[in-house]
Each structure stands twice: as C-alpha cells, then as structure tokens.
Image: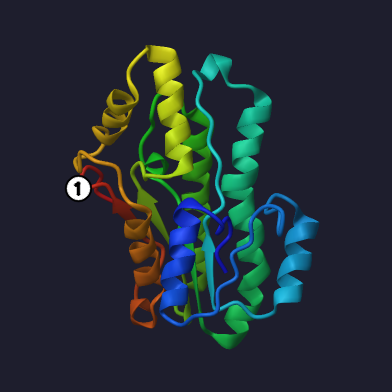
Amino acid sequence: MVTGGTRGIGAAITDRFRAAGDTVLAPGRADCDVTSEEAVAAYFAAVGPVDVLVNNAGISSSAPVTRTSLADWRAQFEVNATGAFLCTRAVLDGMRARDSGRIVTVASTASHVGYRYTAGYTASKHAAVGFMRAVAAELAGTGVTANAVCPAFVRTDMTATSVERIVSRSGRSTSEAEAALAAASPLGRLLEPSEVAFAVSFLAAPEAAAINGQTLVLDGGGIQS
C-alpha cells in the first residue's frame, strides 16, 4: 500500500514494487483521504491484510512564520502527520497478528533540521518521524518494523512548485531557483524519485528485519541521522 501513490515519489515507489512482482495499491486522495478517520478505516477494511505500508501522501506550502495561516499549518499536519498515524493504526493490528510487516514513512531532511519559510512542513515532518519512532518502540522484538526515508529535494511536481515560488518572489530564473534548492544538500543536485523508491524498497525487504526506528537520510552526507 503506497498512499499518495499516483504521482511523483509515490508513483516511483509503486512502479518499483510492481516491477518486483508485488501487488500494489496506490490510492490518491480521491480513493482514500488520509486525513479522514472514517475514510481510512473504510478503505483499509475493504482492502484486507497489508504487508507493506508506505506513508507517502504529503503536502507542503511555503511562507514566513508570520504569514503562515492556521489553515495551512493544520493542513500540512493533517496530511503529513495525522495521515501517517491513521494509516499506520489501520494496519498495525493485522501486522502484529501475523508477526510480519513493514511500515515506511516518506519524510524529508526537514524532519531533522529547520528550513526557512517551511514552518508547517518542517514541524509536520518532525512529527511524522517522532510518531514513527514511537511505533517502532512498540514493535521492538516483533516481526514488524517502522522506519522512515528522509530525502532532500526530489524532482517532483511539489519541488517544481517550490521552484515557481522562488522565481515569483526573487526574480531568479527557473534554472537558478532549481540550483538554489539543489545546493541545500551536498549532492548538489535534485534527487530522482527512483532513488527514494530504492530506499523504501530496501527498508521494506525481508532482509531488513533488524532495522527498526531508523531514518535513512538521502542527501549525500549533510545530515548524520
């Protein structure tokens, strides 16, 4: 199960698992609104047992703290943190009963450090990783694990929107704005969605049973997790 699996990172994750022969459900918001307790409960009840849950659904907005609306703040927490909570809760009993399962949350380098103009996004991603670690503590010693991947900027529609914001506010060209985002990590480039998909598949593998409660940072070495 890959939430937000219809485009960007989610689509790349979905493609990777399907290429390996797995049956993958990749609900978008129209299929399962991860912010709705009722929608999540109904969707997962209809689906049945889930072996791997990838909490990928996410949103972002950008503004200085003083211009961040409460609505934007709440929206990012609802999708990025509460969504991960509701979906994880929906699969947890079944995974524990089978003593087998993988939960991987797609977070961000913003779950480790603070970036200007991203208060809601940064705080919500910190919350998502904190939740993952709490779940992992409850799962310790079982056949179920919970981990997170934390990429730097990835070449997706969400990043393209960030580039557009920089262009509109700074007067930079598109290439200059993209270069500014790429320079935020030692890689000096944007990640490709397939690179994040690889990291997710690694943590979801049976051989990753000893990895629990960890964050796998994808930024070329800038953050030591």
**Height in image: 41 above or below 22?**
above
Under mark 1, the amino acid is Gly
The answer to which of 35 and 154 lies nearer the viewer is 154
Decide if residue 8 is on the left or right side of residue 75.
left
Q: Quadrant of residue 66?
A: top right
Q: Quadrant of residue 179?
A: top left
The x, y position of residue 99, in whole percent, is 54, 85
**Height in image: 85 above or below 67?**
below
Q: Residue at x 52, y 55 (%)?
A: 56
Q: Residue at x 57, y 69 (%)?
A: 1
Count of all numbered marks drawn on residues in the image: 1
Residue 55 visible in this rendered orientation of the protein: yes
The x, y position of residue 32, in whole percent, is 71, 58
The x, y position of residue 86, in whole percent, is 67, 58
**Height in image: 26 above or below 8?**
below
Q: Which residue is mark 1?
A: 221
Decide if residue 152 is on the left or right side of residue 32.
left
Identify the secondary structure beneath mark 1. loop
Residue 133 visible in this rendered orientation of the protein: no
The x, y position of residue 10, in whole percent, is 49, 57
Q: Residue at x 64, y 22 (%)?
A: 69
**Height in image: 81 above or below 22?**
above
Decide if residue 83 is on the left or right side of residue 54.
right
Circle 1: is it few (<14), some (14-19), or many (20+) Cα within 10 Å?
few
Q: Residue at x 24, y 41 (%)?
A: 189
Q: Quadrant of residue 163?
A: top left
Decide if residue 218 is on the left or right side of residue 146.
left
Q: How is the image coloured?
A: rainbow
